[in-house]
Image: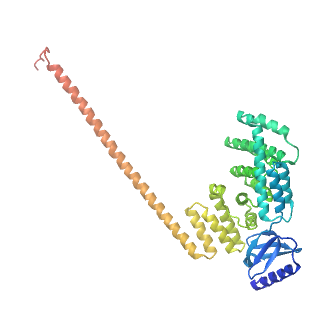
Amino acid sequence: MKAWRLGLVVLASLTALLSAGTSARGDVIYLVGGMKAEGRILSRDGESVKLQSAGKIINLPLSRIERIEEGEVSREGLAQARRLTEAGRLDAAYQAYLSALADPEIAPKARTEARADMRTLRDRAKGEIEDRYRGMLEAGDLPRLLERLTRERPEGRAASLEALALRSFEADLRIQMAKSFLDRKDPVRALETLEEAEHLSADCPEMEEQICDVLLAMESYSKAATSLESALREDPENHKMRTQLLVALVESGRVDEAVSHRKNGPEGYTPSGPWTNQNGPAVGQAFRSMGFRQLERGSPQEARDVYDAGFEMSVRSAGLYEEAIKFYTRVGDNQTASRMFALLRQMEASARAAADWERARRATNREDVARAQAANARRHLEKQLELKEKARSRASRGTSGPGCAPSAPT
């Protein structure tokens, strides 16, 4: 659609929304030109924001938006949950947070804060469970502890914070056991133990996150992708898990799905953090693969943005520069392609210089060894001659000394 036509559509839609009015103070979107719309943001991506207002839904392109102010919807629910927390009523506070999250009008910022507070409550309850079983933990009797936890485990999904903490505690122990199986090169038992942990980790995103860490370490990418997709439905703002999902999908050969997940991710998503730093080459490869796929789809600018991010995270090598030359040539950026070509030639020249230096060093070493061997042989010969001379001298003194009979004339 032409830009001016899109502008007319947005203007007409906003006029209708503003004339209808809005009920409660919600999210406010200020557009270029002074107009604004109030309602509830349903979703946002790298191109537009979907807003619901006065019973209508409209997509607002980011190019028309000046700024966004999130409303205070469901703040009262959060305030009530925090008051219960301060009063020590942790289970009631957790249920209040669940009710706040169930409110369809909750603002994205409030949702993020609620999830963070809920994680703090889970960690606090889990710490109390750990204190309860500290004796068995310190004794290292893990099998007996797991057997006891299995007996005490509540049936079905956790209904209370304590029940959730118990399941989370047991899941954590089974994850640690799976890691030990993996260290002992027993991936079958590691996977079986992880499946048990995954069954226990429902409603506990941090446990699902740990499980996915192990699955990726095992290179079980297809299963990791399934688990990550499920976990992100509960915690869509988790950037680490989104990056892991992209890697898992690409490694599973599902590049198109990876492209869609990245495009529909939360606003401000960037591949960063400790896990990304530790797994930079894998993340870089995933993003470069997505860049090529978006280029095939006919989106050169998006492809460029994704590929650039992947390139920055990748280890520099001749193969990487050769790939980059192909990519930037295809997007029509001959200047960057030329710079990659120069870097490739520089790397090749450095490699040749390093190879020449290594050959010279080895040749010098061989000469040094030969000289050392000759010097050792010379010293050995001199020592032998010295010993023979001493033996001859002793023999001479023995035959001509006092009391010795003169030798017979010849």
Q: Position of residue 173 (x, y in %)?
A: 75, 42
Nearer to us in this view, 70 or 286:
70
Q: Residue at x 38, y 49 (%)?
A: 365
Which colour scheme appears in the figure? rainbow
Q: Nearer the viewer, residue 61 or 316?
A: 61
Q: Give percent across and percent down for residue 57.
A: 85, 74
304 relative position to 192: left or right = left
| Residue 203 at least partly seen | no
Quarter-of-image position of residue 113? bottom right
Residue toward you, 195 or 119: 119
Furthest-left residue in this view = 409
Quadrant of image for the C terminus: top left
Measured as percent of width and height from the top left, residue 83 is found at 81, 54
Residue at x 88%, y 47% (from the top left corner) = 156
Res. 179 in view: yes
Residue at the spot 73% in from the left edge and 65% down from the top edge: 262
Question: Would residue 216 be found to the left or right of residue 203 on screen?
Answer: left
Q: Is residue 303 above or below residue 253?
A: below
